[in-house]
Every structure is written in C-alpha cells, then in structure tokens.
Amino acid sequence: MSDEASLLPKELRQALRRAKYQLVGRHSAAKKCRWLHKSLLNEGTCYKHKFYGIKSWRCLQMTPAIAHCTMRCLFCWRIQSNEVNVAFDETVMTEWDAPDAIVEGVLKAQKRILSGYKAHDRRDEYRYLEAIKPKHAAISLAGEPTVYPELGGLVKEFHRRNFTTFIVTNGTVPKALQELSEEPTQLYVSLSAPNENTFKRICRPQVKNAWHKTTQSLKLLSSFTCPTVLRLTLVRHLKAMNAADYAQLIVDAAPTYVEVKAYIYVGWSRLRLQFENMPTHEDIRKFGRELSE
C-alpha cells in the first residue's frame, strides 16, 4: 500500500522506519524482537518460552495500531506524535484495514525480517526452518490494539491459521474487551500505576476517565475463559515500588498470573526518562517476594 493511503503522518512513518519497524497497510506494523534474533543464534530465549512454552523464534511481534494509543506513558518505547511535532489524534481510528489484510501483511513483513538469516553462519538451521513458519502472534509491540475496531476478527484470522495469540492492552477501552468476538489464547492487561494520581502523572492519558476505564477492564478479567495476566511495569524514582499499593487491585482482578517487569531504557522513552529510572533485577525480585506475601 502506498504511503499516500497511510493513516500516519509522514514524520511518524519516517521515524518508525528509521527504527526498523516494518509498516503494514495503513496503521499496522511488525518488528524483529531481540529474542527472535538471539534465539536463532542459540543465545537465549524470551521469558514467554520458559513460562508459557512460546518458541521465541516462531513468535511474530506485531500491532494493528502502531501509532494509535489512548495514553502517552513516560516509560513507553514507542514514539508519540507530539515528539515529532505533528497534530495527530492517536486515540481514534476512523478507517481501518481488514483483519485478513493485516495478517497477510505482517506475515510478509516477518519473511523480510527473517530473510537476512538465510546466509547467517551462526544461525540454528532447525530453528530457522521453524521460524519461517511462525506460530504465535504477540499482538502488542507498540500502540493500543483495542483502538483497532476489528480486534476480535484479527484474533480469529490468526487462529484460523493455527496461530496462538497474546493480546497486551492498557485496559482503557473496556468496551473493546467486552465485545471481543473471539478471545485470544492469553490476555494481558498492563497495570502501570497503583492509584489514579500516579496513573495520570506517569501514563498521561489522552482519553477521559482513563483510570476508571482501566479498573473496569480489571473487573472484566474474571469473565474470560482464556488465561489472564496483570503486567506491572516498575520505574525507579518515578513511582513508589511498593507491592502493598497494588495488592487490592490484583486481588479484585483475580488474574491467572501476575508479571512484574522493569522499565527498560530503550527506544523513545530515552527522551523522557533516564538510565537511573531502570530498576535492578534485585528490585524486581524484592517486589515479587513482597507481592507473593
């Protein structure tokens, strides 16, 4: 599809391409994950391999909303339209591509991503042959997937091709979760703050009543038949890393799993935060121990 048809301003497209995003259609994208690369060279795998059995080399990292989001989180690695001085409503998608076109597009993008490994002298041959036939779609990468109006259809299209799917959402569009026509294999909701004041300061919501909507999404988790995950991102010196502050929210949501992760000083978040904001491994372990108690 030509750039003229894209929903993204030229400045955004250029910045994303410089960062090695493979733009697909009018608003979607795929990108090589660090763990895809490392797993093909037998240098380790993503935690999802150990926790959930997802082979990193067969995982397709994609988004149906590369530049659309309801928040501008300080710790997010994605570029935000205000950072390239363009006026662009990131919160609404007024026209969109069909699910089958997006899936076809990201599969072609993944083939382009993998083409460079064909002659790589350190690649694992068995893993490479599996990688060119991906089996898992991580519907995350960047942006907020629930802004895409046919998210359930996208999940269904991946499942039709025998993929497993993870959706990662910030929870600010509970209606989209409530109306999903097909559940993913696993659903993640990011819980990025323990209270509304911290949420507004760090997540910088671009829609009204975002905290209330997030708590609504937490209450919806128990209605899903698929496994659910609450994902907590910790940031040093920006918000208190106190497990007790999150405890009641987690109890009320009753997710299948809770994942605690550190903010990583990568991408465009480096324009907003400092290296010192990145928690240590021991910080995460300590928080996890406190949470389990």
Image: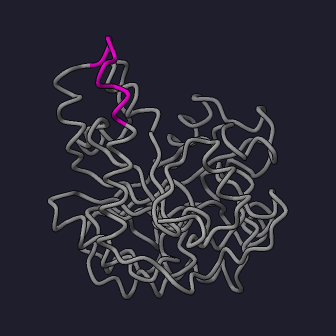
Q: Residue at x 35, y 29 (%)?
A: 45
* Residue 142 covered by magenta stretch: no
| Image quadrant assignment for residue 101 | bottom left
Relative image position of residue 57 (x, y in whole percent): 29, 35
* Residue 118 covered by magenta stretch: yes
Relative image position of residue 75 (x, y in whole percent): 70, 50
- The residue most toward the right is 85
| Image quadrant assignment for residue 142 | bottom right
Front-lying residue, 188 or 123: 123
Q: Residue at x 32, y 81 (%)?
A: 223
In the displayed structure, would residue 56 be above or below residue 182? above
Q: Residue at x 34, y 48 (%)?
A: 60
Q: Which region of the structure is painted magenta?
A: 114-123
Relative image position of residue 70 (x, y in whole percent): 64, 74
- Would residue 53 be found to the left or right of residue 76 on screen? left
Q: Residue at x 74, y 50 (%)?
A: 240
Front-lying residue, 218 or 162: 162
- Would residue 207 be found to the left or right of residue 177 on screen? right
* Magenta: main secondary structure: loop
In the displayed structure, would residue 289 be above or below residue 40? below
State how many labels appear.
Answer: 0
Relative image position of residue 254 (x, y in whole percent): 39, 68
